[in-house]
Amino acid sequence: MTIGHAIRSDKGSAATEFALVVPLMLILLFGGMEAGHFVWTQHKLAEAVRDGARYGARLPIDEVCDGTAQVLSTEAIARIKRLTRTGQVVNPSANPKVPGWTDAQVVVNPNCDNDQFVNTGLYTEYAAAYDSGDDVRGPVIVVSATNVTYPWMFNALGSVMSGISNSGQGGLTLSASSNSPGIGL
């Protein structure tokens, strides 16, 4: 075979094209998977704080607030944090919904001196329990998750393939917050 014949030959061109395209295909494949995992993890976090806020809102109002003063016990706060983080109230050793998520990253804040929530409906029945007269407003339970480290699907490879930089000491962190009006059922 002569050199001229080898240059004009198309044998092996498919293998060459495949070798050129494979790295790009792998980046798109693994980057897409990591991006989907990121969105799914953020959704789990947002859903978890919503569940925690709803659970806290169902506690009896007199266990949450005494007038405008917060009286939520540390045990009730621990139950709200546990439900938020693991989806369970009883088992403190249950696996977290997001790997590596701790109770210290969950903040429970009942807002008893709330002037933003409605003062109609069931809160009119509790007017006698409050010293504020006719302007009775229900408490709002706020549950937040802060600085939850994102668990990379492929560790360092995930950040490279997805194009998301893992800068900073703590890496990529997620946060979410939700509130729910106390209904005390």
Image (spheres, rainbow, N blue to C red):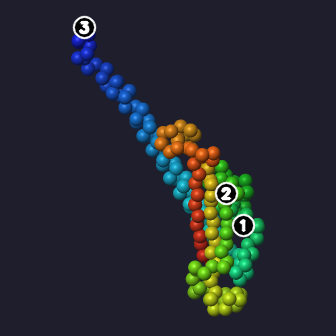
Q: Mark 2 and mark 1: span between their CA atoms?
A: 13 Å
Q: Report whether residue 62 is seen.
A: no
Q: Residue at x 40, y 35 (%)?
A: 24
Mark 2 lies on residue = 105
- Farthest residue to the front: give it: 168
Up/down of 157 relative to 100, above or below: above
Q: Position of residue 132 (x, y in %)?
A: 68, 89
Q: Residue at x 53, y 37 (%)?
A: 157
Q: Are marks 1 and 3 in contact (CB under 8 Å)?
A: no
Q: Position of residue 52 (x, y in %)?
A: 63, 65
Res. 66 mark: none
Res. 77 mark: 1
Q: Earlier in the sequence, mark 2 or mark 3?
A: 3
Q: Quadrant of the C terminus?
A: bottom right
Q: Quadrant of the N terminus?
A: top left
Q: Earlier in the sequence, mark 2 or mark 1?
A: 1
Helix, strand or loop for disc 3? loop
